[in-house]
C-alpha cells in the first residue's frame, strides 16, 4: 500500500475542463435546460476520467474534493476578476451554486457504484460453487431425516 499520494496534472486538467465547460454551457444553454445538461456533462467527464484512474471509493472521494477546491478557486478568481466584480450578482445566480454538489457527489457516487458492482462480481464468482454445494448438503440432510 502506498503511503504517499502522487500528484497528477490530469486531475487538475479535468477540474479546469469541468469549470470551463460550465462557463461555456452557462453562456449558450438556456436556463431550464442548463440543469439537465450540466449533470450530464459532469457525469460523462467523470466517466472518461475514471477510465484511466483508480476506481475505488477513496479515489472518487479524493477526486471529488480536489475538483471541488479547484473549481472554488477558479470561481473565486472569476468573482474578483473583471467579469463579475459584483458579489451579489454572483451569489444570486443559482447556476454558480449548482455545480458544487455535482462535482462533489458525481465522482463519489460513480466510484461507489463501480466498487459495488466489482465486489458483487467477485463475490459471485468466488462463492458460486460453495453456495450450490451448501444447498446440496442441506437437501441431503433434509432427505436423511
Image: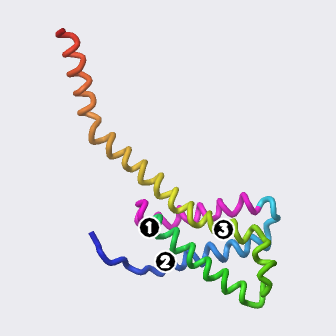
Is residue 39 within the magenta segment? yes
Q: Which mark is residue 52?
A: 1
x then y, percent, for residue 91: 75, 75
Q: Which mark is residue 134?
A: none
Q: Secondary structure beneath disc 1?
A: loop
How far apart are the alpha carbons under marks 1 and 2? 10 Å
Highlighted magenta segment, given as a residue range: 34-58
Q: Nearer the viewer, residue 54 or 52?
A: 54
Q: Is residue 18 above or below residue 35?
A: below
Q: Is residue 95 above or below residue 111?
A: below
Classed neighbour count for the residue bearing mark 2: other residues with Cα under 10 Å, few (<14), some (14–19), many (≥20): few
x then y, percent, for residue 129: 25, 33
Q: Which quadrant of the structure image shows residue 106?
A: bottom right
Residue positioned 24% across, 17% down in the render: 139
x then y, percent, for residue 59: 43, 66
Q: Is residue 17 left or right of residue 127?
A: right
N-terminal of the pair, mark 1 or mark 2, is: 2
N-terminal of the pair, mark 1 or mark 3, is: 1
How far apart are the alpha carbons under marks 1 and 3? 24 Å
Q: Is residue 83 left or right of residue 100?
A: right
Residue positioned 54% across, 79% down in the render: 13
Q: Which residue is mark 3?
A: 99
How far apart are the alpha carbons under marks 2 and 3? 20 Å
- The C terminus lies in which quarter of the figure? top left
Callout 2 touching callout 3 (CB < 8 Å): no
- The N terminus lies in which quarter of the figure? bottom left
For the residues carrying marks 1 and 3, which lies nearer the camera in this image?
A: 3
Q: Which residue is mark 2?
A: 10
Residue positioned 63% across, 82% down in the render: 74
Q: Residue furthest bottom?
A: 82
Amino acid at each position: 500500500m502506498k503511503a504517499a499520494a502522487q500528484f497528477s496534472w490530469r486531475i487538475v486538467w479535468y477540474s479546469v475542463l469541468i469549470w470551463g465547460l460550465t462557463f461555456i454551457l452557462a453562456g449558450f444553454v438556456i436556463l431550464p435546460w442548463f440543469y439537465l445538461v450540466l449533470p450530464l456533462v459532469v457525469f460523462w467527464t467523470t466517466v472518461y476520467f475514471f477510465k484511466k484512474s483508480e476506481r475505488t471509493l477513496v479515489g472518487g472521494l479524493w477526486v471529488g474534493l480536489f475538483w471541488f477546491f479547484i473549481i472554488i478557486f477558479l470561481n473565486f478568481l472569476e468573482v474578483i476578476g473583471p467579469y463579475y466584480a459584483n458579489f451579489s450578482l454572483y451569489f444570486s445566480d443559482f447556476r454558480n451554486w449548482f455545480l458544487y454538489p455535482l462535482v462533489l457527489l458525481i465522482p463519489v457516487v460513480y466510484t461507489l457504484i463501480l466498487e459495488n458492482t466489482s465486489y458483487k462480481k467477485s463475490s459471485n464468482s468466488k462463492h458460486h460453487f460453495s453456495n450450490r454445494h451448501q444447498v446440496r448438503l442441506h437437501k441431503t440432510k433434509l432427505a436423511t431425516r
